[in-house]
Structure formats: structure tokens, C-alpha cells
Image (cartoon, rainbow, N blue to C red):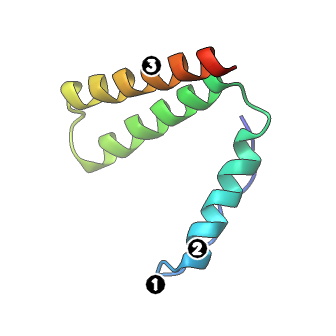
Amino acid sequence: MSDIPKPEISPAFTLEDIRKIRDWKYERYKGMTPQEICEDTRKGAERFFARRKPADPAMLAEVDRRLEAIRKKYKKTG
């Protein structure tokens, strides 16, 4: 995974902040395979849910189901 630092986001969360996040994600993901991107996304979802409340197994299963659909899509087009 990439070690590109996260962008600084303003408290107002402007369109410029959204662009910074998109550019940051692009730089992080441009050298990754679709499977690596899915794994990184899954880990981020797990961290997010762990901070919010105890992990809901049904929600994590839904995230895994959606990521699997993305993997299949990339496999067909890749």
C-alpha cells in the first residue's frame, strides 16, 4: 500500500476538500490491482465500523458482498 500522506481537510468540508481526497485516493490506488483496492477498502470499512460501534457482522457481510461484486466487475473488464 502507498504511504502518501492524507490531505488536510477544512472544517467546512468544501469542494476543494473533495478534490483533495479524490486526488489522494488516485495517487494511492494507481499502482494497485483491483483486488488490492478492494482489500484496502474492506480494511477501511472495518476500521470505520470499529470506531462507530461494535462491528455489525451483517453490515460487514454486506460490505464484503459489494466488494465481491466490484471484483467480478473488474475481472470481466480487466
Q: Amino acid at mark 2?
A: Asp
Above or below 50: residue 8: below
Dot 3 corresponds to which residue? Answer: 68
Q: Residue at x 66, y 67 (%)?
A: 20
Mark 3 crowdedness (10 Å alpha carbons): few <14, some 14-19, many ≥20: some
75 and 22: which is toward the camera: 75
Dot 1 corresponds to which residue? Answer: 12
33 and 70: which is toward the camera: 70
Whether residue 1 sits left or right of residue 42 in the image: it is: right
Which residue is farthest front? Answer: 77
Mark found first going from the N terminus, 3 or 2: 2
Q: Are marks 2 and 1 in contact (CB under 8 Å)?
A: yes
56 and 73: which is toward the camera: 73
Mark found first going from the N terminus, 1 or 3: 1
Which residue is farthest right? Answer: 31
> For numbered disc 1, what is the local secondary structure?
loop
Above or below 46: residue 70: above
Q: Amino acid at mark 1?
A: Ala
Q: Amino acid at mark 3?
A: Glu
Point out residue 77 in the picture as x, y percentages from the top left corner. 65, 21
Dot 2 corresponds to which residue? Answer: 17
Distance, label 3 to label 2, CA atoms, is 29 Å
Give the quarter of the figure containing the C terminus: top right
